[in-house]
Image (cartoon, rainbow, N blue to C red):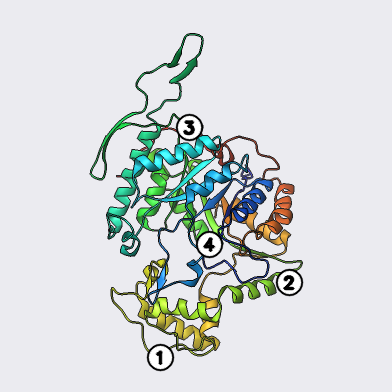
């Protein structure tokens, strides 16, 4: 019996400030003007994407005591942007990253319930934790939480938020004008939640929203992150961009669902990917190389190297050889707030690996950074890219993709105009929206209370 053809889920990631953005390109626009958000969102909706995703940064990152230059444009508030986009879109899901380490369940539940009402059921929450004391300095609780404590707080945070969302059943408001009866139940919104992280009780002041609760996303590749996603998330973001790695991650996370009484289809796996399109394969490869050089300027290459070496390397020539000195090891870091610092847990070993790679390829600092840091996931003609995307989904390396264009705001236009029609011709992507809510777009069942891993 042949395997049924899977439908591809597509989402757009507003590039903002990150390592894929090319702000210096003549076609690049503002990362903070509302018109940029509108352009990308309306392009995604025109292409019938599931949702638009906004990341969050709670503090500008620093390097050598100065604001990292790609962060200078700022990090506008997620809820403000998504609420405004709800007014200029009709079907597109609106997903935002909101931190569980420094926020409180009541305020976050209230904001998401409000967004779900304003958007008629299109809200999604990417639940994340924060790992560094650098960000914690912005908040009264200060400091940071150890990883096991962060995920305990996240699990308890989500359970508390669910109780708040569910404190309204949805049938309390009758608004009977003839008989003067507004509420069927005089006691809606009551909650009483007492756990180690949250000791709260009262009444939730937003009636049940169209989806009941926002769609829950999670981004995390650690053991704790995978387990958290399997227990509670509707979708998980992943960085695994190759077929082999994608299939392994897919099988691992989907294999955990049965522990929580969940089926294979109750969690969507969506890798974040980039793309470069060309008239021919050779044209696309040439454009990809140019974009990588735009993304990694000489200054950026030195800064990325400093994140491993933990030293001021500003005197080094980015077109020259790697430093002969070894990285400094210790708690102090020259790059505050960068996840890459946390990723390189053994910087001396990373430096040795990079030296061997540079020697074998006769690579300069800039060439090495280009080689070892993120690159375009899908490069080719529209037909080649459409075929590859479909292969990932049909062979269980992903359920869909979150596309991060390298240009703001027009970087998604070409994909929407060329690749999407090819996917539609193959019968693996919708030509029209078939439902009203984001849960409908993702093929998720109506919400039900689920157990979160303790």
Mark 2–mark 4 Cα distance, whole angstroms, equals 26 Å
In space, the residues marked 4 and 1 are separated at their CA atoms by 35 Å
Viewer-nearest of discs 3 and 4? 3
Foreground mark, 2 or 4, reads 2
Which one is earlier in the sequence, the residue at label 3 or at label 1?
3
Of 333 and 328, which appears nearest the observer?
333
Q: Which circle's residue, 3 or 2, is located before the other in the chain?
A: 3
**Quarter assignment of residue 293:** bottom right
Of the two numbered discs 3 and 4 on the same chain, state the one appearing first in sequence. 3
Q: Position of residue 85 (x, y in %)?
A: 58, 46
Disc 3 and disc 4: Cα gap in Å? 40 Å
Q: Residues within 10 Å of mark 2 (few under 14, many from 20)?
A: some
Q: Earlier in the sequence, mark 4 or mark 1?
A: 4
Which residue is the site of mark 4? 244
Q: Position of residue 366 (x, y in %)?
A: 53, 82
Does any portion of residue 395 appear in the rendered image? no
Q: Which residue has dot 3 on it? A: 209
Q: Residues within 10 Å of mark 1 (few under 14, many from 20)?
A: few
Q: Residue 113, can we see it?
A: yes
Q: Secondary structure at mark 3?
A: loop
Q: Residue at x 37, y 29 (%)?
A: 167
Residue 359: x and y in percent read 50, 88
Q: Which mark is residue 283?
A: 2
Q: CA distance from mark 2 to mark 1?
A: 38 Å
* Towards the viewer: 280 or 144: 144
Residue at image x 49%, y 83%?
A: 357
Residue nearer the viewer, 304 or 256: 304
Which label sits on residue 324?
A: 1
């Amino acid at each position: 019996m042949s395997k049924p053809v899977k439908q591809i889920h597509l989402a757009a990631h507003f590039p903002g400030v990150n390592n894929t953005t090319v702000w210096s390109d003549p076609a690049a626009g503002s990362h903070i003007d509302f018109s940029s958000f509108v352009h990308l969102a309306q392009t995604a909706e025109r292409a019938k994407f599931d949702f638009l995703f906004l990341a969050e940064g709670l503090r500008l990152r620093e390097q050598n005591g100065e604001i990292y230059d790609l962060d200078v444009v700022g990090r506008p508030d997620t809820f403000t942007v998504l609420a405004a986009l709800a007014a200029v879109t009709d079907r597109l899901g609106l997903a935002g990253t909101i931190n569980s380490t420094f926020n409180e369940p009541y305020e976050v539940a209230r904001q998401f319930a409000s967004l779900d009402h304003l958007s008629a059921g299109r809200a999604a929450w990417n639940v994340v934790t924060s790992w560094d004391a650098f960000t914690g300095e912005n908040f009264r609780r200060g400091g940071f939480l150890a990883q096991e404590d962060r995920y305990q707080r996240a699990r308890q945070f989500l359970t508390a938020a669910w109780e708040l969302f569910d404190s309204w059943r949805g049938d309390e408001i009758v608004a009977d004008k003839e008989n003067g009866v507004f509420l069927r139940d005089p006691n809606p919104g009551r909650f009483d939640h007492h756990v180690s992280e949250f000791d709260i009780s009262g009444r939730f002041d937003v009636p049940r929203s169209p989806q009941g609760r926002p769609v829950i996303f999670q981004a995390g590749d650690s053991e704790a992150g995978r387990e958290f996603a399997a227990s509670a998330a509707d979708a998980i973001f992943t960085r695994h961009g190759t077929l082999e790695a994608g299939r392994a991650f897919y099988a691992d996370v989907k294999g955990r669902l049965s522990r929580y009484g969940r089926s294979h289809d109750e969690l969507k796996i969506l890798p974040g990917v980039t793309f470069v399109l060309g008239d021919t394969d050779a044209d696309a490869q040439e454009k990809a190389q140019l974009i990588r050089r735009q993304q990694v300027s000489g200054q950026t290459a030195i800064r990325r190297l400093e994140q491993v070496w933990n030293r001021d390397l500003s005197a080094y020539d980015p077109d020259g050889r790697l430093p002969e000195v070894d990285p400094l090891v210790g708690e102090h870091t020259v790059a505050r707030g960068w996840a890459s610092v946390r990723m390189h847990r053994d910087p001396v070993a990373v430096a040795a690996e990079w030296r061997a790679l540079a020697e074998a390829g006769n690579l300069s600092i800039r060439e090495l950074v280009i080689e070892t840091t993120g690159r375009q996931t899908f490069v080719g003609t529209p037909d080649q890219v459409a075929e590859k995307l479909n292969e990932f989904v049909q062979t269980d390396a992903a359920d869909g993709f979150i596309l991060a264009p390298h240009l703001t705001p027009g970087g998604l236009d070409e994909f929407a105009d060329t690749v999407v029609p090819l996917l539609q011709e193959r019968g693996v992507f919708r030509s029209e929206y078939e439902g009203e809510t984001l849960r409908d777009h993702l093929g998720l069942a109506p919400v039900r209370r689920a157990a979160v891993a303790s």
